Image (tube, rainbow, N blue to C red):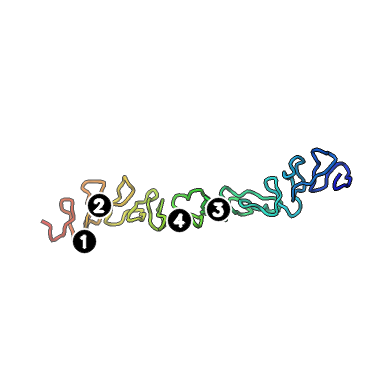
Amino acid sequence: LSNDHCISDRKCPPGQTESPDEPEECIPCSNGCETCNSINTNHCYSCSIGFIFYDNQCNSYCPKGTVKSENGDKCIDCSEGCLSCEVSNISICHSCKDGYFIYNNQCHSQCPPGTFQIENNHECVECPTGCKTCQQLNTTLCLTCNDDYFLYNENCYSSCPNGTSPLETKQECIDCLPNCNKCDVNKQPKWINCGTGYSLYQNYCIEDSECP
């Protein structure tokens, strides 16, 4: 019995299911359901035309964090952290959920090494070349460097500038003494090469005119 009409084979029409209390009676499924569970009519098995299936519910649109399948009959979860993503590739994110930051079309709970998170934009931006971490308010200034780079004046160098020496234990460049072009602070004597007009004397660079 459905809407006071008898139907054949005791099969309910679309959008209805058999009553658990009265097996010969049909009861309506929740809105949008074409077929549903007879005990819980909010639990959908399939959807009516114009509705999309997701998590045993039928909706008129896909919830955030999901994307409509290519044939348009269901919603598919985007990859973790994604608020919106590509239909053809759910791992390609367009935007991220709160607490996640986008970088290279991926959503991260923490920005990868060599990048820095911008809170207001939910994105990670790259630090300068060689930087492992950089300053929050000025991403052009480095705090630490990648392997094989040395920190000097908040920049990362593959080799230390003239007048400085790499400190092996700290991965940073240390200033040589004044007038010294080249030195090695890890060895004794430290001073190797002096600037123009200066000469090395007893491990220091002195003016040529002062040479004994």
Q: Which residue is mark 1?
A: 196
- Mark 4 or mark 2, which is nearer to you? 4
> Rounded to the nearest whole Å, what is the CA distance between mark 3 and mark 2?
49 Å
Q: Which residue is mark 4?
A: 126
Q: Which residue is mark 2?
A: 183
- Mark 3 or mark 2, which is nearer to you? 3
> Rounded to the nearest whole Å, what is the CA distance between mark 4 and mark 1?
39 Å
Looking at marks 3 and 4 on the same chain, the residue that comes earlier in the sequence is marked by 3
How many residues crowd around disc 3 within 10 Å: few (fewer than 14), some, or many (20 or more)? many
x, y (%) of residue 206?
16, 57
Q: SS of the residue at dot 3?
A: strand
> Rounded to the nearest whole Å, what is the CA distance between mark 4 and mark 2?
33 Å
How many residues crowd around disc 1 within 10 Å: few (fewer than 14), some, or many (20 or more)? few
> Rounded to the nearest whole Å, what is the CA distance between mark 1 and mark 3?
57 Å
Badge 4 amino acid: Glu
Q: SS of the residue at dot 2?
A: strand
Q: Is residue 40 left or right of residue 169?
A: right
Badge 2 amino acid: Cys
Cβ–Cβ below 8 Å for labels 2 and 1? no
Looking at marks 2 and 1 on the same chain, the residue that comes earlier in the sequence is marked by 2
- Nearest the viewer among 92 and 8 is 8
Q: Which residue is mark 3?
A: 96
Looking at marks 3 and 2 on the same chain, the residue that comes earlier in the sequence is marked by 3
Q: Is residue 77 left or right of residue 145?
A: right
How many numbered discs?
4
How many residues crowd around disc 4 within 10 Å: few (fewer than 14), some, or many (20 or more)? some
- Measuring 87% from the left and 42% from the top, which residue is drawn there? 9
